[in-house]
Image (cartoon, rainbow, N blue to C red):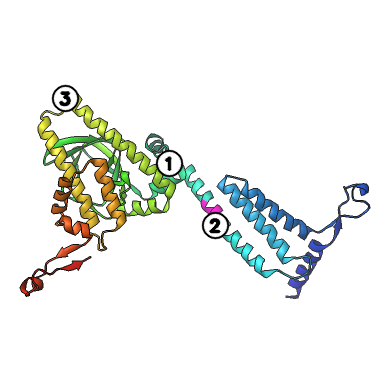
Amino acid sequence: SEKGNEIRSNARNWLTEARCVKFIPVWMTRGRAIEYSITELAGHASFILVAVSYATDDFLLLRTLAVAGSSSMLIFTYFHPHGRVLWLPFRWNLLFIIINSYRIGRVLWDKWEVRNLREEELKLHHDHFQLMDLVDFTKLLKIGEIETFDDCELVVDQGEENRSIRLVLSGQLDVFRDGTYTYTLEEGNFMSEAGLHIGMRLTGSVESSGGVVSRGKCRCIKWDRTKLMELLDIEKDLRRSFLSALSWDIIGKLKGQRRLLMNGKVKFAEQWTEKRNSQSDHRYASLLKNILSRPEVLSPRSRYEIDNYRAVHHIDDAQHEYALSLCGWSLEEFASGQKLINTPQNLNSSNWGTTIFSW
């Protein structure tokens, strides 16, 4: 409109008007006046702000300086001293402002959520996730669900397909194998982590290697395994701190089982050891079952995860072969990475030994 054109024209004239620096003595400039315009100052300010942003480690300050620098460049490119709008850098800087503004908004929102954490949640962070940033911890809480169990309530049955990873918040959970008590999960212990501590990122359900029953009132936080793996894949820092918490938990569980034997709480040590070994074999077979049930061919990454788990938990070749047999696989099929299926058509044909690949 005519009014809008007039406003832009007046703004351009004011911003591009040549001004003289008056506070510098004449003898320092050899009698020449130093001229400047507000538009030129905006251009210089843009590059200075960008340079300063490179020197800061604070994420929020860096983004704020980047927005301020791009905003100054918008003024310089739109009200250019030569009178022509530089649309190409103007549009690019506008895009940068939108991106950085979004990131600033995300950071401020995350900080607001941290400030609204309840005392119970802060205690959970302090007790079990100290290495985790509070913003990452808030993201972890978002996909979690608090559960409460009464005394002697069944949490997970042996052989049940379990989609959840749990952390005990209060109380105790007793773990049984074929009705024989094997160990106790206490406050801060993870349950059904399924090799996550050594980098296994299993999704979906994993068959439980033992029955879990609450001893007294018990509270847990539960995460869906698939949603948790998706979050850990996206948030690298969160994944590192979460795996660190899992590693400490494994150490704590091993110490707890040693204390059971030292304190004489295991009455029949030979039977207890047999059930613990049986539970370990079942656990490994459950992990293999989850991996081998995937439709794709066994990937190099999956092989690496399996080999790593075997090395950490001392799974020998005989145990490995036994676990494969429980999954309906042979060593040859595992080596090929594909399940071989004999079909009725193949068995009735003259070439009955042929097989087809299913993945």
Q: Position of residue 87 (x, y in %)?
A: 67, 69
The residue to which callout 2 is attached is 102
Q: Quadrant of the N terminus?
A: bottom right
Magenta-colored span = 101-106
Q: Position of residue 115 (x, y in %)?
A: 49, 42
Residue 91 is at least partly visible in this image: yes
The residue to which callout 3 is attached is 264
| Dot placed on the residue nearer the N-terminal end, 3 or 1 | 1
In the picture, the disc for residue 132 is 1
Q: Residue at x 47, y 47 (%)?
A: 113
**Depicted 216 relative to depicted 104: above or below:** above
Mark 2 to mark 1 CA distance (whole Å): 24 Å
Q: Secondary structure at mark 3?
A: loop
Label 1: how many Cα within 10 Å (few below 14, some 14–19, many 20+): many
- Mark in the foreground, 2 or 1: 1
| Dot placed on the residue nearer the N-terminal end, 2 or 1 | 2
Q: Residue at x 20, y 54 (%)?
A: 289
Q: Residue at x 25, y 63 (%)?
A: 295
Task: Say whether marks 3 and 1 touch (CB < 8 Å).
Answer: no
Q: Quadrant of the C terminus?
A: bottom left
The amino acid sitting under disc 2 is Tyr
| Main secondary-structure element of the magenta-colored stretch | helix
Q: Residue at x 38, y 34 (%)?
A: 127
Mark 2 to mark 3 CA distance (whole Å): 59 Å
Q: Secondary structure at mark 2?
A: helix
| Dot placed on the residue nearer the N-terminal end, 2 or 3 | 2
Q: Nearer the viewer, residue 66 or 319?
A: 319
Q: Position of residue 345 (x, y in %)?
A: 9, 73
Q: Is 105 within the magenta?
A: yes
The amino acid sitting under disc 3 is Gly
